Amino acid sequence: MLNLTPKKITPRTALRVNPCKTCQPVGAIYCALGVHRCMPHSHGSQGCVSYHRTFLTRHFKEPAIASTSSFTEGASVFGGGSNLKTGVKNVFDIYDPDMIAVHTTCLSETIGDDVGSYILDIDLPDNKLVVHANTPSYVGSHVTGFYNMMCGFINYLSLNTKHPNDKIGIFPGFVNPADIREMKKLASIMKAPFIMFPDQSGVMDAPMTGNYEMYPKGGTTKEEIVSLGDCAKVLALGVFTSLEPANVLKRKCKVPYEALPLPIGLANTDQFIMELKKITQEEVPATLEEERGRLVDVMLDAHFYCYGKEVAVFGDPDTALGLTSFVLELGMIPKYVITGTPSDGFEKKAVELFHSYQVEGCMAKASADLFELHQLIKNEPVDLLLGTSYGKQIAKAENIPFVRAGFPVLDRYAHSYFPIVGYLGGLRLTELITCALMDQFDRECEDEDMDVVM
Amino acid sequence: MREKELVLDQYNAKVYKNRKEHILQIDENAEGQAIAANTRSIPGIMTNRGCCYAGCKGVVLGPLKDALVLTHGPIGCGFYSWGTRRNKAKTESGENYIQYCFSTDMQEPDIVFGGETKLRKAIEEAMEIFHPETILICSTCPVGLIGDDIHAIASETEKKYGITCVAFSCEGYKGVSQSGGHHIANNGVMRHIIGTGDTPIHKKYKVNLLGEYNIGGDGWETERILKRIGYEVIAVLTGDGSVEGLRNSHQADLNLVMCHRSINYIAEMMHTKYGIHWLKVNFIGIDATIQTLRDMAAYFDEPELTARTEEIIADELSVIAEARGYYHSKLQGKTAALYVGGSRSHHYQALLADFGISTVLAGYEFAHRDDYEGRDMLPFIKEDADSKNIESIMVEPDPEKFKAFLTKEKYEELRARIPLDSYKGLIHDMKTGSIVVDDLNHFETEEFLRLLKPDIFLSGIKDKYVLQKANVLSRQLHSYDYSGPYSGFNGAINFARDLTMGLYTPVWKFVIPPWKNHSTLQASLAEITGGEEATC
């Protein structure tokens, strides 16, 4: 496996090998799927949306709907205005969403299609809406596309009506439906009325009923996105994902925000809870304190399987940092912390974490790829690999225990139905990590070293 | 013709006008049933189609294990086509490019100022790290728009490093589907690779397997059977294929064409240039495999080979006999709908029929009219603006390498018996009342599901869970749901096993919760009465 990867690291400035990121539009689609009765629409050639739907379906094992402007050579030369007009008409006619969320592609961006003015020229059916976001594939990554689409919704819809709704807005970041459910649970326990935006729970984990619903029950409603402008505050979870939309909302509707790390692990979840406490002035209920206590208990129980073990963490910036924070709490050493997404400040944040736990010999890198990670591991190996499905090749090549977390996980089932955020998410991660390490030990140890009790 | 109209009637006038030409309800008594195909999808229709790049890089070039395929473009396209088509491939050395994704990961400045510098640099870095003997450059949408000259860079690379480097302008907006990309890939491979090898192959019964992408190991299972009989497979295009194999493929005595759509250009060009006839084969399905093996034996027409063919058929059949009977009993009488790329929707009907399953609907994602109606109608296809944009290259007989395997008389005699240099198409094998849909979209999938109520819907990942959520078994025929092989005799059993698992998994019984079929009122009364009796 990956036998062509040499140990010797050669600097590269142009060749990307085995990327740890993908392009903006897939993030834009995932974001738009978190809006109730919304059809994501890709303004580009139809291959883009085919790849994105395929990819999202493979991660969630759920239908991922999206339409396309189906550019051909003609549209690429003359502009995609009429394709968009026809597309919007047909989507409303045939699929009847309440809203269409258009995002651009590298094709429509390169030819300079002005999607905003195209939309203004379209006669829309009553009570139907079209919003858009610019998501050029040659800038940033899928994470960028995700938050650009959030900004698109806010720009089009959110309003400050001067009538506060006494709610907080929660921007959950690029996470799984189960993570969103967990965040909602925590906010509810803390008695904080909230608007979750976007909200893919109930959409990308819709139940099996025997009837296919194109628009399942979940998703942030249009009214809720409008009402974000009247929120008292926004909690922007994951600074690399949620800060930009929080800024846009602040500029547009004067809603203040607090940017927090994704609540992965103890400290980050504590911070989330403390922030909710500050807002609601409510005491933290005993049930939640007990839930936290159970996580600490298990982490203590299992600490000696984790302490000092070296980990390579990779994935989207906020997820990777959250996981890094958590493995540090377990006493592990995050030797390599890698994201493919170009992000200013990622490395600095990771280094701050290294320092706060006084671990040494760790490195963090943004705009990196998995080929480089593999080479690093070949030079100085790790005990555990923690990241997306694309780590499985490295895990096999180097025989490293591997825990899947983040986006995408294409090769396992039910993963998106369990949170990695919150105290519950910490419990799950502890189990996954210790099981991976201990399974490897059991599989490879000498017969005389096999312990029935561990 | 009821179902077709019931679906179409729900469209607005413009969509109706377009889609009515793409849906056909079969009438076996009608002459020359025609269908519109290989035309643009309507924006907003939620087509399942992909793009030119997907056809070129994803389908045809991606499986080549000894070529470094470099995507020139922003990161997405390369990323999505990385290790996701299940083209199994192995090499003796363990060095295998298909585990890798290579991209120039173009950034905004590259789009503004041009990406040629970055492409050159990426090639330089690839040479330094991987030392490939072949680099294939595939461009994505913005590359064509900004006008990077990838072909010039390819020839420059060949001179500079002394390797083979071929560029493919397969920007996603070209053509109307993946199909344009197949054609572009075929052109490049034919122009630059096929016939460039000079390793003499002194074997009898030399064949190439064309349009076999070794999904789930199909190609390996087919090769296993062919080798047992005594055939020598020189090259596979392109599953588990290699540039090395392709170079020498002009020495074959016969080309076997599996996926007609994606590879017929090469088959035709090799016929013209090297005199190699092609045979439309189908190794999907037990009876289909037997027929194909007999057709091949007829082509070579040597008693020893014919005898060996029958011997292997009998042996393979005896191995699967028990399983075949069992699965037939589990599957007989079921109905299926198929919606796949360009040939599988035809091939798999044979396999379904082996187990008593009838086909109620079949459609192709990116086929042309000849895939539906047969190649006899080729002269009648009108070129449109989109198909004209895809280059058709012309080849001449090669003065040194052309050889005719058959005499003219033998050729004519064979052509009357076996599908030599010909393909009858999908419609030919479909029954009256069944439906053929070109470029089936999401809406039509849901509607036909409701109207035709197939037990099994064989399709792709994008609609798999739509169908499953609607209580219908859906198996992916692009990826085989990570199972396979489905080819040949053993593959047929694998397929039947997977269908049986899907139809008989106990989980279906739990979809409706027990309380949904249970009257709450009666239940509570009964409980109350029960409770009182207990107290008394």
Image (cartoon, rainbow, N blue to C red):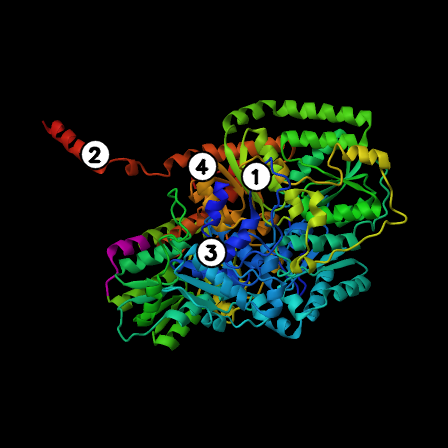
The secondary structure that dominates the magenta segment is: helix
What residue span does the magenta drawing correspond to?
A282-292
Between B307 and B242, which is closer to the camera in this rendering? B307
Q: Residue at x 27, y 58 (%)?
A: A189
| Quadrant including the C terminus of chain A | top left
Callout 2 amino acid: Ala
What numbered label is drawn on residue A452?
4
| Crowd band around label 2 with a 10 angstrom C-alpha radius: few (<14), some (14–19), many (20+) | few
| Crowd band around label 1 with a 10 angstrom C-alpha radius: few (<14), some (14–19), many (20+) | some
Q: Disc 1 to disc 3, how far (Cα)?
A: 24 Å
Callout 4 amino acid: Val
Percent x, y of residue B251: 83, 43
Q: Which residue is mark 3?
A: B12
Between B69 and B416, which is closer to the camera in this rendering? B416
Percent x, y of residue A337: 52, 61
| Crowd band around label 3 with a 10 angstrom C-alpha radius: few (<14), some (14–19), many (20+) | few
Q: Which residue is mark 1?
A: B26
Tell me if residue B241 can be seen: no
